[in-house]
Amino acid sequence: MNIADLRREYTKGGLHRDDLPIDPLELFEKWLRQACDAKLMDPTAMSVATVDERGQPFQRLVLLKHYDQDGFVFYTNLGSRKAQHLAKNNKVSLLFPWHVLERQVHITGEVEPLSPLEVVRYFHSRPKDSQIAAWVSQQSSRISARSMLEAKFMEMKLKFANGEIPLPSFWGGYRVRFDSIEFWQGGAHRLHDRFLFTRMGDGWQIDRLAP
């Protein structure tokens, strides 16, 4: 399969400095709302990049569950590979790939664990099967067959058939306190528009980057 000639032109419009708010979160919220209005598949999906102790980068898609001026929030198994990486290096990179809109948003920052109250409140807002699944999977561990997961799921479903499902001690979440946000809008002739917001004290420095 020859993929060298697979390409397309970016034609959905540009991004101009006059379009930029002082606060990057305002533009992020606008773009996210537009991604939702366009009915993109999983508009809150973001790639989370971490680095292990050998300097090897890893990426995976997770769902953004909250955002505000304090940061971007996601949840995970605290025994997962990403959590092990973050325990040793709390720097993280996020990427929202909104391809249909010819947009990307790249975020850098540092994670901090969420409070137990935040975690338990979100956990009990999840569908019951999702709560059960959190008990079943020792995320990132090696398993011999899917049937093991399915059997464990049914076992836990019976165990928690009545009453509230307790929060697993090994399940939690992180807040990414961001120090930079880059907005990327596809442009004609590969002359894409890129603007980088970098935190400077209580404000933001805005720079246009070459495509």
Image (cartoon, rainbow, N blue to C red):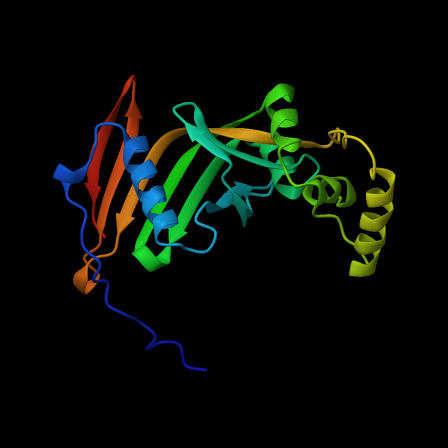
Question: Is 152 situated left or right of 125 in this image?
Answer: right
Quarter-of-image position of residue 68: top left
Question: Is 7 situated left or right of 36 in this image?
Answer: left
Residue at horizontal 29 percent and vertical 17 percent from the top? 202
- Residue 34 appears in view: yes
Q: Residue 167, position in %: x, y?
A: 73, 29
Residue at horizontal 45 percent and vertical 40 percent from the top? 93
Question: Is 101 situated left or right of 58 in this image?
Answer: left
What residue occupies the far top of the structure in this picture? 202
Quarter-of-image position of residue 188: bottom left
Q: Residue 90, position in %: x, y?
A: 54, 30
Q: Is residue 169 above or below residue 42?
A: above
Residue at horizontal 41 percent and vertical 55 percent from the top? 40
What residue occupies the far left of the structure in this picture? 18
Q: Which of the two residues, 34 or 176, is positioned nearer the viewer here? A: 34
- Residue 88 appears in view: no
Q: Residue 92, position in %: x, y?
A: 48, 36
